[in-house]
Image: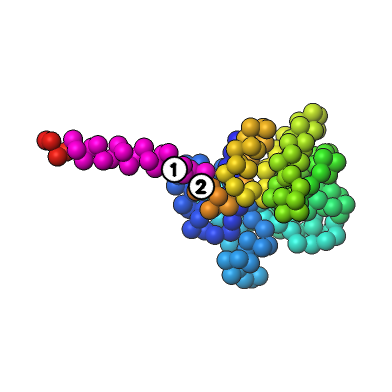
Amino acid sequence: MKFFLDTANLDEIREVASWGVLGGVTTNPSLYCRIGGKLEDFEAHIGRICEICDYELPVSAESVSMTRDEIVADGIRLAAIAPNVVVKIPTMIEGLAATRELAKRGIKVNMTLCFTVPQAIMAARAGAAYISPFVGRFDDISEDGLSQLAQVVEAVNNYDYGHPVEIIAASVRSANHVAQAALMGADIATVPYGVLKKCVEHPLTDRGLASFLADWEKVKANA
């Protein structure tokens, strides 16, 4: 499973890239707003993210238009920022139509806000290269987001769509979400920086490291 970072924060992206585990970046309007992003700087900011990703790792930039023609126009403009931009489009009828048109132009689409198996299969049929079923938002309404993700992974992988389709576990809230997504075969987990740090940390690792260091101090004292 690949790790995408779900953020618009450049420092977070640089830090995770330094770990050697960064597989891509996903952004959305809320994440850009959270860093105090300005409308006039949006495309330049996406370009800076693409540069950190060496113009190779996929960077999802979202259209905020609501009609197919406007979404297609957004997608063409966003894809022109850098070769690794993936256009993020909400799962809706106008989004499906726009995805079809963009896919025909060779522009990759990440279909987001996906919650059901039929939505996911239609996204794949329309030409989406990535599909982002949400986990945490199901949990927010007291439903089982992981079981919904498992159904999407199984159903999408049942069929050949004539092009590669990767499932991105999105709206990830915990290290357990990441672990379960990996066990069920999701291709990617897009994870906030704080959650990705928790995926590295474990109290037994900390305890073992403290023990090793303490014993090494004894070795040095006996030198």
Q: Earlier in the sequence, mark 1 or mark 2?
A: 2
Badge count: 2
Q: Is residue 206 magenta?
A: yes
| Residue type at numbered disc 2 | Lys
Label 2 crowd bin: few (<14), some (14–19), many (20+), radius 10 Å: few
The residue singled out by tag 2 in the image is 198
Numbered label attached to residue 203: 1
> Residue 144 in magenta?
no
Closer to the camera, 60 or 51? 60
**What secondary structure prevails in the magenta region?**
helix
Numbered range of the magenta stretch: 199-219
Q: Residue at x 73, y 36 (%)?
A: 150
Q: Which residue of the protein is positioned furthest toward the left in this rendering?
A: 223
Quarter of the figure with the C terminus = top left
Q: Position of residue 30 (x, y in %)?
A: 66, 63
From the top left corner, tell me how far across and down residue 50 is, in percent: 57, 52
Which secondary structure, mark 1?
Answer: helix
Q: Is residue 199 left or right of residue 164?
A: left
Residue at 46% in and 44% down: 201
User: Which amino acid, mark 1?
Assistant: Pro
Q: Residue at x 67, y 32 (%)?
A: 185
In three-dimensional space, the C-alpha distance between marks 1 and 2, rounded to whole angstroms, equals: 11 Å
